[in-house]
Amino acid sequence: MNDIAEEGEPNASQSDSSTVLDSLSTQGARQIYEREAHIVVDYSQLDDDYKDVSTYITHTINFLTL
């Protein structure tokens, strides 16, 4: 009976594995966020029409409907 009751419960090694994977995922996400924080986008050559979001959306919709 104990085997049946324990079947759905994670054992110690499964819990440890999950903790390690969670830790690695968190570290990976942290590294990605750190790299993204250093991204610099140069908009100086972007047409002024596209710097305004609403204008950009209008241009994109018009382009897609051609």
Image (cartoon, helix red, strand yellow):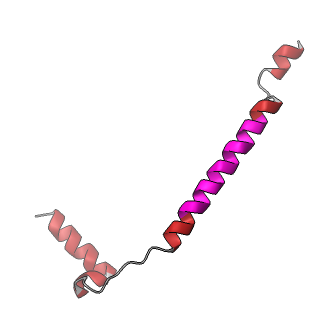
**Residue displayed at 74% across by 43% down:** 19
Quarter of image, res 29: bottom right
**Residue displayed at 89% across by 16% down:** 2
In the image, 38 versus 10, the foreground residue is: 38
Question: What segment carries the magenta color?
Answer: 15-32
Position of residue 12 in the picture relative to residue 39 (left or right): right
Return the x and y of residue 42 as percentages of the image width and height: 34, 81
**Residue displayed at 77% across by 38% down:** 16
**Residue displayed at 71% across by 43% down:** 20
Return the x and y of residue 61 as percentages of the image width and height: 21, 68
Furthest toward the top, the residue is 1
The vertical placement of 11 against 33, above or below, is: above
Position of residue 1 in the picture relative to residue 34 (left or right): right
Q: In which quarter of the image is the C terminus?
A: bottom left
Q: Main secondary structure of the magenta part?
A: helix
Furthest toward the left, the residue is 66
Return the x and y of residue 50 as percentages of the image width and height: 26, 81
The vertical placement of 23 against 47, above or below, is: above
Quarter of image, res 4: top right
Return the x and y of residue 35 as percentages of the image width and height: 51, 67
Q: In which quarter of the image is the N terminus?
A: top right
Is residue 24 in the magenta section? yes
